[in-house]
Amino acid sequence: MEDLKEKNSEYEIVGEFLADLKRKFRGGDNEIIKVAELKRVEQENGTMEEFVQGFRRAVKNSRYEEQLLIEKFKQSINGIIRQKLMKSKYPSRSIEKWYRRATNLNRHWRESKRENEILRERRETESSAPRLNRPANTGGV
């Protein structure tokens, strides 16, 4: 720092130099942080809505190209949902459309799982309930 003062550099005050240095190199740190955040984002057992919110936060202000975002999004979502999206006739090229389609699919998939669970529980209850012996209809009086 003394060297800066002695050489009468273009930075009159060391604070200006440090502020300028931070301004010039801040973007690199931001990108590194964004890459690390994106690597940590996984859907796991959460809803797609929660995942999409976290994914959007992780990529906000990043410089990722649309196709890279889509690829990372596909890698991070539930395997069943990913397979259904990949089998679609016209895969989207817009990350926003991927968000919407994945959210809708996930919602329907979870609803279907709940309905199947309810049906399974009903069948179990019906099969374990005692049956009433009813007299057979003999067609007579």
Image: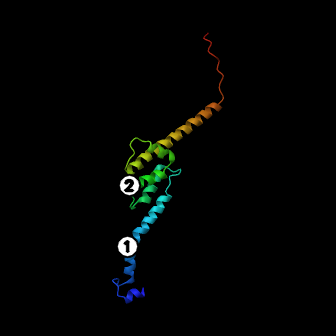
Mark closest to the chain's N terminus, 2 or 1: 1
Residue 31 visible (yes or no): yes
The residue carrying mark 1 is: 24
Q: Residue at x 37, y 80 (%)?
A: 16
Residue 141 visible (yes or no): no
Colour treatment of the image:
rainbow
Task: Reply above or below: 11 against 51.
Answer: below
Label 2 packing within 10 angstroms: few (<14), some (14-19), many (20+): few
Label 1 packing within 10 angstroms: few (<14), some (14-19), many (20+): few
Q: Position of residue 29 (x, y in %)?
A: 43, 68
Q: Residue at x 65, y 32 (%)?
A: 128
How many numbered marks does the figure carry?
Answer: 2
Q: Secondary structure at mark 1?
A: helix
Query: Tag 2: residue type?
Result: Glu
Q: Residue at x 53, y 41 (%)?
A: 114
Q: Position of residue 130 (x, y in %)?
A: 66, 29
Query: Tag 1: residue type?
Result: Lys
Q: Secondary structure at mark 2?
A: helix
| On-image quarter of the N terminus | bottom left
The residue carrying mark 2 is: 66
Q: Answer with the quarter of the image where residue 8 lies.
A: bottom left
Q: CA distance from mark 2 to mark 1?
A: 26 Å
| On-image quarter of the C terminus | top right
